């Protein structure tokens, strides 16, 4: 359903189980307003794209969702629980996994160690040695036709392979919400399609995806809903039957009134 009119109004008070809601988010950096009263809802089993030009607030929104930045005002709620205090650990505990635009790997550690980096609290008690290596390789086989060496030093791999490791790390958490921030930027079409297939399988099983991309063909093919940000404000949220390339471009540029 479109909510172009009143785009910054609060989301519904009652959320079905599994939904993620941002309520009236405001974030400033000094006198700069990065996000201004942004509200939206992300539903299980859907891909919700955040679209906006540079400086629209997308990166700030991702950091708030993942617990890296607190909002100055407003809240993030998952399954009826509020991320308070807002921390990465709290976000993970509620089932939110983020793959950032900046590739986050430990270059001097192995492929297996990187897939499980920061996750020992979940996995160490049940996965050791060979089982851990096999799970790492299984996760990566969904994302790449290249066979990874589990003992390889990640710093010696190329940028796309490092990004695939970061994605595999997020998927290993079996998240309720997966945030992909420009994760396809360095990928070729084949690599991108493998990622989309892996994502589609999990969306079909009920996972929600927040997707950020500057590639309009990806937005049009993958999205169930699109939220357009402009200058830190939400100007529209459109369902699949409502958005088209021309309409999204008009909203991005401000030629279509909110």
Image: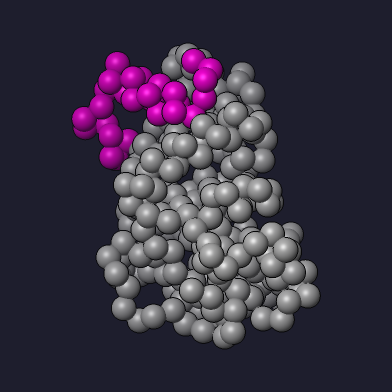
Q: Which residues are magenta?
A: 120-147
Q: Is residue 244 left or right of residue 78?
A: right
Q: Residue at x 59, y 42 (%)?
A: 183
x and y percent of residue 85 in the render?
Answer: 39, 66
Say which residue appears at 49% left-offset and 15% top-offset.
147
What is the chief secondary structure element of the magenta stretch?
helix
Camera-side residue: 153 or 230? 230
In the rendered structure, the answer to whether residue 28 lies left or right of residue 133 reads right
At which x and y percent is residue 26?
A: 57, 76
What residue is drawn where x is 32% and y is 35%? 120
Q: Residue furthest front?
A: 241
Residue 73 can be seen, yes or no = no
- Depth check: give the residue in front, 45 or 92: 45
Q: Quadrant of residue 230?
A: bottom right
Vertical comparison of 99 with 94: above or below: above
Any magenta on residue 130?
yes
Which quarter of the figure is the C terminus placed in? bottom right
Provide residue 136's location: percent of width, then percent of height.
39, 25
């Amino acid at each position: 359903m479109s909510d172009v009119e009143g785009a910054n109004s609060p989301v519904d008070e009652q959320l079905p189980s599994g939904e993620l809601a941002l309520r009236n988010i405001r974030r400033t950096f000094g006198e700069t307003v990065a996000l201004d009263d942004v509200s939206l809802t992300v539903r299980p089993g859907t891909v919700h794209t955040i679209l906006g030009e540079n400086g629209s607030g997308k990166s700030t929104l991702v950091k708030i969702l993942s617990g890296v930045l607190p909002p100055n005002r407003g809240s993030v709620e998952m399954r009826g629980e509020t991320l308070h205090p807002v921390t990465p650990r709290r976000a993970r505990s509620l089932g939110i996994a983020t793959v950032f635009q900046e590739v986050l790997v430990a270059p001097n550690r192995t492929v297996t160690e990187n897939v499980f980096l920061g996750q020992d609290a979940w996995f160490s008690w049940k996965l050791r040695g060979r089982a851990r290596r096999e799970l790492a390789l299984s996760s990566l086989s969904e994302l790449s036709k290249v066979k990874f060496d589990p003992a390889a030093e990640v710093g010696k791999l190329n940028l796309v392979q490092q990004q695939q490791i970061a994605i595999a790390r997020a998927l290993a958490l079996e998240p309720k919400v997966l945030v992909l921030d420009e994760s396809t930027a360095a990928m070729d079409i084949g690599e991108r399609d493998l990622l989309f297939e892996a994502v589609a399988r999990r969306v079909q099983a009920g996972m929600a995806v927040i997707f950020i991309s500057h590639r309009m063909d990806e937005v049009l093919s993958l999205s169930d809903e699109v939220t357009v940000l402009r200058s830190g404000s939400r100007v529209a949220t459109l369902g699949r039957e409502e958005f088209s390339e021309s309409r999204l471009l008009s909203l991005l540029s401000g030629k279509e009134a909110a």
